[in-house]
Amino acid sequence: MSDDVATPASLVRGFLSSLMKAALISKDAQGMQWRDEATRLQRLIVERSGELGNLKIDGLWWLAVNDAETPELEASEGQIQWGQPKTCPFTISELSSKEFNISYAVQHLRETASTG
């Protein structure tokens, strides 16, 4: 699905998934790929912030965590173990803010994870 026809829910889910992947991945170059994707999606979310009001952020969070915690990426993970909070650590207002800081968000996800 192209970005111009993506639903607000799919944009937020993709964004959260990219943040999680960046938090999970230990290799800088590979992690940077996910930070770049998160940055791109976050710009789209800001542009469409008026469409986000009815989203169920915690449901999208869990879908995004499941998207990020794939067996294909497991070998590259090294920053944290799986196990994120049950509720999304960010609000819709935070995600749709022009001031949202991707680096801070990735670090926050690393700090709030269960480290098994």
Image (cartoon, grey):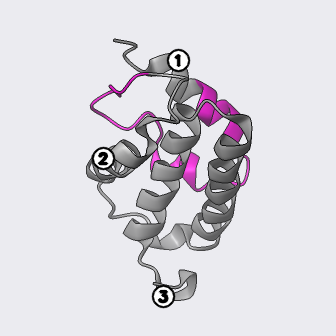
Instruction: Answer whether residue 70 is visible to the viewer in this image.
Output: no
Label 1: which secondary element: helix
- In x, y percent, where is residue 87? 31, 34
Q: CA distance from mark 3 to mark 1?
A: 34 Å
Q: Main secondary structure of the magenta part?
A: loop
Residue at image mark 1: 111
Magenta-drawn segment: 81-107
> Is 102 colored magenta in this rendering?
yes
Marks 2/3 in contact by CB < 8 Å: the verdict is no
**Of callouts 2 and 3, the N-terminal one:** 3
Specify whether 16 is left or right of 35. left
Q: Amino acid at mark 3?
A: Val
Return the residue at label 2. Answer: 66
**Which of the 4 quarters of the picture holds residue 62?**
top left
- The amino acid type found where label 1 is placed reads Glu
Is residue 83 in the magenta section? Answer: yes
The picture places residue 84, in percent across and down from the top left corner, at 35, 28
Specify the label residue 18 is tagged with: none
The amino acid at mark 2 is: Asn
Q: Is residue 33 above or below residue 76?
A: below
Q: Earlier along the polypeptide chain: callout 2 or callout 1?
A: 2
Of label 3 and label 1, which has the lower sequence position?
3
Query: Going 29% across and 55% down the picture, which residue do you hit?
Result: 56
Q: Residue furthest top?
A: 116
| Figure quadrant of the N terminus | bottom left
Closer-to-camera residue (59/36): 36
Identify which residue, 114 or 30, lies in the foreground.
30
